[in-house]
C-alpha cells in the first residue's frame, strides 16, 4: 500500500450516487484524481478530455450498460490499452466471462473495499513506489 497515486486519473462510471461517492472518497484519500460519470454516455463524453489511467465501470446501468461502455472504450484505438475494471453486485461466472469478451481487465464485486480498489489499480497501472 505504499504506492504513489498522486495525480493518477481514475474514472468511476456508476449510476449509483453512493458508489460514485464511496469510490471518490476512498481514492481521493490516496491521492487519485477521481472523475465520475453517471452512465456510459456521460463517460464517453468525458473520456477524451480526461484520458483516465484506469476506468471502473458498473455493469448494470440504464441506457448503455457496462459491457457496451467497455466495448466502446476498447474499440477506440486511443483508449484500448486503458484498463477497464467491471463492477457488479453479483458475482457470476457468466458476467465475468461476458466482461472478458468485451475486453475488461478485471471484475470486482460490489460492495468493494478500499483494498480491492487499490489492488486493482496497482495491478493494472504502473504505480511509482516512492
Image: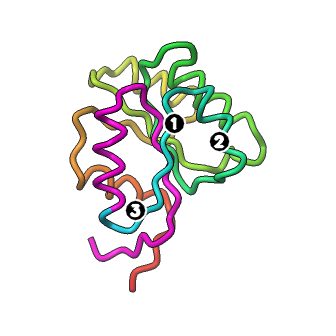
Q: Secondary structure at mark 3?
A: helix
Q: CA distance from mark 3 to mark 1?
A: 22 Å
Residue 122 marker:
3
Q: Which residues, given as a range, are shown in magenta?
A: 1-28
Q: Which residue is mark 1?
A: 37
Residue 32 position within the rendered picture, expressed as x and y whole percent measured from the top left: 43, 63
- Is 4 within the magenta? yes
Task: Name the residue located 22 percent from the left edge and 35 percent from the top edge.
Answer: 111
Q: CA distance from mark 2 to mark 1?
A: 8 Å
User: Would you identify the image quadrant in which residue 58 lies?
Assistant: top left
Disc 2 packing (10 Å; few <14; some 14–19; many ≥20): some
Q: Which residue is mark 2?
A: 46
Task: Tell me which label, 2 or 3, sits earlier in the chain.
Answer: 2
Determine whether, in the image, residue 82 is placed left or right of residue 22: right
Task: Tell me which label, 3 or 1, sits earlier in the chain.
Answer: 1
Quadrant containing the C terminus in the rendered view = bottom left
Q: Are marks 2 and 1 in contact (CB under 8 Å)?
A: yes
Task: Name the residue located 27 percent from the left edge and 21 percent from the top edge.
Answer: 90
Query: Which residue reaches farthest top?
Result: 63
Query: Which residue reaches farthest right?
Result: 77
Amino acid at each position: 500500500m505504499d504506492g504513489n497515486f498522486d495525480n493518477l486519473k481514475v474514472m468511476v462510471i456508476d449510476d449509483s450516487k453512493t458508489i460514485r461517492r464511496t469510490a471518490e472518497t476512498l481514492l481521493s484519500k490516496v491521492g487519485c484524481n477521481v472523475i465520475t460519470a453517471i452512465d456510459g454516455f456521460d463517460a464517453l463524453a468525458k473520456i477524451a478530455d480526461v484520458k483516465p489511467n484506469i476506468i471502473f465501470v458498473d455493469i448494470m446501468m440504464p441506457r448503455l450498460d457496462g459491457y457496451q461502455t467497455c466495448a466502446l472504450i476498447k474499440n477506440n484505438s486511443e483508449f484500448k490499452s486503458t484498463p477497464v475494471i467491471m463492477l457488479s453486485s453479483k458475482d457470476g461466472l457468466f458476467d465475468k466471462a461476458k466482461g472478458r469478451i468485451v475486453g475488461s481487465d478485471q471484475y470486482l464485486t460490489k460492495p468493494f473495499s478500499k483494498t480491492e480498489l487499490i489492488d486493482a489499480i496497482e495491478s493494472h497501472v504502473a504505480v511509482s513506489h516512492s
